Image: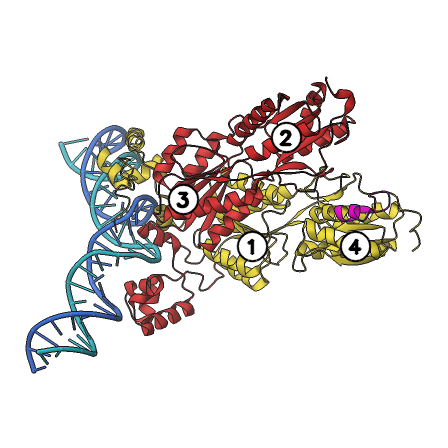
Chain colours: A red, B yellow, C cyan, D blue
Amino acid sequence: MKRDSDSGGERRPSVVPTISQVAKASGVSRATVSRAFSRPEMLTEATVRRVKEVADKLGYVPNQVARALSTGRHGNVALIVSDVANPFFPPLIRAAQLRADQAGLCVFLGNSDEDPAREELLVGRFIGQVEGLVLASSRLDEEHIRRHATRRPLVLINRDIEGITRVLIDTAPGVAAAIAHLAELGHRHIAYVSGPTTSWSNQQRRNAVRREAEKRGLKVIAVPARPPSYDTGRLAATQIVASGVTAAIAFDDLVAQGLMAGLAALDVEVPKSFSVVGCDDVLGETTYPPLTTVSARCADAGDVAVGLLLSQMNGGVSGEIRHKLNSHLVIRASTGPAPMKRRGR
Amino acid sequence: MKRDSDSGGERRPSVVPTISQVAKASGVSRATVSRAFSRPEMLTEATVRRVKEVADKLGYVPNQVARALSTGRHGNVALIVSDVANPFFPPLIRAAQLRADQAGLCVFLGNSDEDPAREELLVGRFIGQVEGLVLASSRLDEEHIRRHATRRPLVLINRDIEGITRVLIDTAPGVAAAIAHLAELGHRHIAYVSGPTTSWSNQQRRNAVRREAEKRGLKVIAVPARPPSYDTGRLAATQIVASGVTAAIAFDDLVAQGLMAGLAALDVEVPKSFSVVGCDDVLGETTYPPLTTVSARCADAGDVAVGLLLSQMNGGVSGEIRHKLNSHLVIRASTGPAPMKRRGR
DNA sequence: GCTTGACATGCAACCGGTTGCATTACATTC
DNA sequence: GAATGTAATGCAACCGGTTGCATGTCAAGC
């Protein structure tokens, strides 16, 4: 093998210097150069200074890959999400990155597209070169996840598997508040616009809706919006209006926004003749009308997940961790009193 | 060094098998195992089958890091963006990923937060373990970018540096159409709500606005929204209304959306008494009123950039590449005739 | 039946670092 | 001044693959 002797023939010193070259140039052994970078406290100050000077002049930077091979520490983590383009994820990704960054780690990002096979493929590609992984809204089955967890530290977001560290955005309290809010406004018949069946969040929200509605004597129907998106939310509008309900709670904000667009197209006014509640609070006040939604600080989930991963990587695994993040209802302008004409069927 | 002898003490064969173990178990040399995976055509079909069977049983997967060390091919690329949470980027990231995925590459994602120093740090961390990088909306100065480009194949998005492969979303035609559109509607005095000064896109848009406005005899003022976001857009509303203009073109959709919110708060109706045009078309029809905007298929930029990177990595560098992506105006409902009372000052 | 060549496989060096252990140099103590 | 201890550095093996070259095998060709 012969590498970049001069790939193109224009760059002169384009060859990246190695530890041996620095060693020769500064008259010490390779071990000393290595130590000058990774454990300087073992060396004389003078030696460290001298080596680093030479290294600087040569433009030497320790090769991460070589280092990873011999130490087993790669300095990388992987984050896999189900859909980068869903507004729920960007803030989460950003927060996760920030946290990883502070720890000097690089992050691989994977996009599973809601497809378990694709997710499995990504894990396979990442796992050999990372020290840990975060799976957000994983669509993998439990067995696979458990297997990966034996190979590397692994943290789940919004997936509840016993024995595996996980951070869960607990939207139940927010959803309960939403139901209470709607009940107070006089709604007696509502719809839950549901997301992916394999989604833990969806199951959790759907159950919370059922439970709270029952407690208050409301009737609930479920209408699917799959995969969850603006478009599927919009398309669900017809069915929802036809069902005679006066309010809907959507799986997430995107679906809620789509639903509002669909309602507008059917000349149903929000909140005058229909109320809509979202979930996640990632669209803030940017919808029209501003969306009443269950707020769950999703950025925190990314931050916490990486934090837990770090502590797990550093061996500080103190038993099972199931970190819950709270939620609450934010009332804006997409909910209002139930329309009279519809009341009582 | 002694690794994962049994981290936890529950999993038995949790040690990841190496090429040597597979070699021993299947009675061939390490070289043969290596070839069974990387160059099977050199071996007998029977040998390949046998080796792979054993490997499967043992759960062997070639170690990417070790492979990278000896071949120099890492199978990774890096994508650095200025702000993951800006809706312009997620579709771009998604498309870039998809393309990289098809080529079997893993992608590192970096978030520079609009900060050159941070961006430089990220490049430094990535460059040793990737075969190429894509810098989207880079805030690095030209010198740094050139230096990195000598070390690795590098593709820029929305940054125009001679001699470096770049893909540019050319919003000038769309902006020109927007100005024409506004002029036809009777607007004579408009504002450009500008983004980051170091942004190539911003310079390009600002210039296009100036040029076209001049051509049609419109007056233009510039109002900053920095960094570009919903909030800075909203805050710019007051100043814009006070200036007496009847329409505004915003640096991007997010700023436009914020501006509309700010106008609503001031009881200025869009489009009745004020017209707003966005840029990027990443919010689609999800704003209220649906936003008239300069559409630029930003996802394509990600796809094309990775495509160019791939061909550059494979040595097919055929001179300088400056790939332009077109744009056009999408007229929705945030623009309308100039209000009478304001006409002529 | 021996030469020739093609093909399959093995040997061993190498990629660029890290690290346990040995060695050396130097200061301290008696 | 020799013995002892300690701190700084070097030696060489190792991480887990890849690959140029040598070797071995077998069939075709003369």
The tag earlier along the polypeptide, 3 or 2, is 3
Amino acid of disc 4: Thr
Quarter containing the C terminus of chain B: bottom right
Quadrant hosting residue D29: top left
| Badge 4 density bin: few <14, some 14–19, many ≥20, Cα 10 Å | some
Q: Residues within 10 Å of mark 3 (few under 14, many from 20)?
A: many
In the picture of the structure, the residue carrying the numbered disc 2 is A180
- Label 1 crowd bin: few (<14), some (14–19), many (20+), radius 10 Å: many
Residue in the image at 81% along x and 58% along y: B221
Kind of residue sitting beneath label 2: Ala
> Residue A307, image x and y in percent?
45, 48
Which of these two is toward me, B166 or A268? A268
Determine the chain carrying the residue at label 2: A
Can residue B315 be seen? Answer: no
Q: Which residue corresponds to mark 4?
A: B238
For marks 3 and 1, give the one nearer the viewer: 3
Residue B30 lies, in percent from the top left, at 26, 41
- Residue type highlighted by circle 1: Ser
| Distance from Cα at disc 1 to Cα at disc 4 | 30 Å
Q: Is residue A198 visible?
A: yes
Image depth: mark 4 or mark 3 in front: 4
State how far apart marks 1 and 2 are (Cα): 42 Å
| Callout 1: SS | loop
Magenta-colored span: B261-276
Left or right: A267 in relation to A32: right
Q: Which mark is residue A132?
A: 3
- Label 1 marks a residue whose chain is B
Residue at mark 1: B112
Q: Is residue A232 magenta?
A: no
Query: For the residue labelled by badge 2, is the local secondary structure a helix, a strand or a loop?
Result: helix
**Tags 4 and 3 in contact by the CB under 8 Å rule?**
no
